[in-house]
Amino acid sequence: MVLTGFLVPGAVARGEGADPASGAEATAPAAVDLDRIPAEPPVQPAPPAARELFGADCDTEIEGSQVVAYCHNRYPQTDLVRLHVECDRWWDVDGDGAAVALGPAGRVELTSRCWKEVRSAWVSHQRQ
């Protein structure tokens, strides 16, 4: 059994008493210029900034023409939350609720409605 994985790269097997190859078969020993190897690894890009912790978690429920949003602020900064409702009918007035200051660890329930069906509802957040 012959293990070739232990051979030194570039080593050439020769028979006993054989002279080194000459001409086109000859290979020069590999030379490494140590000045071309960088002393330090390349500079890595800066890691991305940590995501800023802000904004209350809100769950919005739509039932018929009624909209309710339940918000909880788990961060240390006050969040001004506002409920927005878009009504489905062209003649029904869309509503933007008043901003409510939601302090750290606070909870709030925001409500609004349309005369008929609700197309969409969402909560916006603003720093105080």
Image (cartoon, grey):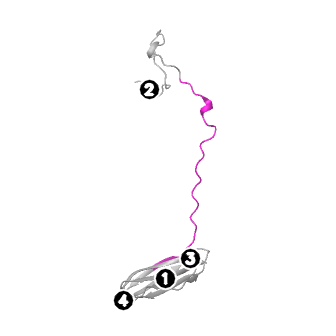
Q: Which residue is mark 3?
A: 126
Q: Tell me the tag on residue 83.
A: 1
Query: Which secondary structure class fits the magenta region best?
Result: loop
Indicate yes or no whether the magenta region holds residue 57: yes
| Quadrant where the C terminus is found in the figure | bottom right
Q: Tell me the tag on residue 116.
A: 4
- Looking at marks 3 and 1 on the same chain, the residue that comes earlier in the sequence is marked by 1
Under tag 1, what secondary structure?
strand
Q: Along the line of sight, which residue is nearer the eye, 69 or 2?
A: 69
- Looking at marks 2 and 3 on the same chain, the residue that comes earlier in the sequence is marked by 2
- Looking at marks 2 and 1 on the same chain, the residue that comes earlier in the sequence is marked by 2
Q: Identity of the amino acid at label 4? A: Lys
Which segment did they paint magenta? 30-59
Q: Residue 105 location, x and y as percent? A: 58, 78
Q: Residues within 10 Å of mark 4 (few under 14, many from 20)?
A: some
Under tag 4, what secondary structure?
loop
Q: Residues within 10 Å of mark 1 (few under 14, many from 20)?
A: many
Indicate yes or no whether the magenta region holds residue 32: yes
Q: Residue at x 49, y 23 (%)?
A: 10
**CA gap, disc 1 and disc 4:** 18 Å
Q: Which residue is mark 2?
A: 4
Q: Residues within 10 Å of mark 2 (few under 14, many from 20)?
A: few
**CA gap, disc 2 and disc 4:** 82 Å
Q: Kindly check if marks 3 and 1 are in contact, taking CB atoms under 8 A apart as contact.
A: no
Q: Residue at x 55, y 74 (%)?
A: 55
Q: Is residue 34 above or below residue 76?
A: above
